[in-house]
Image (cartoon, grey):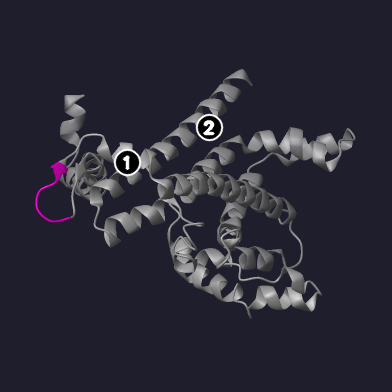
Amino acid sequence: MTTTLRRVPPVVWVFLAVPAAVELGMVFWPALNSFYLSFTQWNGLGAAKPVGLDNFRALGSDEIFLGALKNNVLWAVGFGGLSVLTGLALAVALNRPRRGVGLYRSAIYLPMVFSLAVTGLFWRVQYQPDGTINTVLGGLGLGGWEKQWLADPDTALWAVLVAAVWRQAGYVMVLYLAGLKSTDPSLDDASAVDGASPWQRFRFVTWPQLRGVNTVVFAVTVIDSLRTFDIVWAMTQGGPYHSSELLSTYMFQQGFTFLNLGYASAIAVVIFAMALVFIITYLVRATKNEVEA
């Protein structure tokens, strides 16, 4: 082992050490520092004052935080479920070669090219009282459904969710298209010859072959849902009356508006814990099913 290490040219160690140092300094150290700050009271100036678990106790009685936590759960379920279902349906529909299929794929993926902030501003215009949404509803004779979507506490969160899914669906579609290309078409053909319906062929032949892609899609979607910030901030900034507040937007307000960085770090720890629970739970179940299979 020692002889093998000695044969590695020094320049290789340099190329390995530089990105490792950048990763440690730009990712791991700030993350560890956030955990430390979550147990302190700090406004960004001077020394941080240790307060133990006070920040986490305060979160338990913070109505805005609890509302944001509830919204985050709804967002994770709605964003993840709708993105995956829409992306998978599009991938299945556009998997077979046909005239213009490349154009359709490109058009559906196009929203991913734009940043979330730009997407938010685009949809904010659509949701204006005289925007596209209300205009179409009025043209269809559904004028009673017209409303100020982003100013109504009952619809603000769901209006932003639609915009986020519109952007994410194309990305999920591409992931599933890659997975569908790696499936064995002979199995599908054999099941069709045996009289299986299209749904049965997908459910019992194609879907099991997408297990690896499902793990990637789930992890990416959960992480994206929990770190969502740009599109919500661009469209509602968490309003009205915190009805569309997410943990990320509330963390931003506490940290950079009120300079309550210790409290904001505690919220960041909660976000990290939620992501960890979601992903570990899914991976354990996926691994268990794979072993049983």
Q: Is residue 59 visible?
A: yes
* Quadrant housing residue 9: top left
Q: Position of residue 31 (x, y in %)?
A: 27, 44
Asked if disc 2 and disc 1 are in contact, CB closer than 8 Å, the reply is no
In this image, 50 relative to 284: left or right?
Answer: left
Q: Work out whether 246 lies above or below 110.
A: above
Question: What kind of element bears circle 2?
Answer: helix
User: What residue span does the magenta drawing correspond to?
Assistant: 44-49
- Look at label 2 and name its amino acid: Tyr
Give the main secondary structure, helix, strand or loop, of the magenta stretch.
loop
- Is 72 inside the magenta-drawn segment? no
Q: Which residue is mark 2?
A: 282
Q: Is residue 223 visible?
A: no
Closest to the camera, between mark 2 and mark 1, is 1
> Residue at coordinates 34% horizontally, 45% vertically from top-left?
267
Q: Position of residue 148 (x, y in %)?
A: 61, 71
Q: Work out whether 51 lies above or below 234.
A: above
Q: Which residue is mark 1?
A: 58
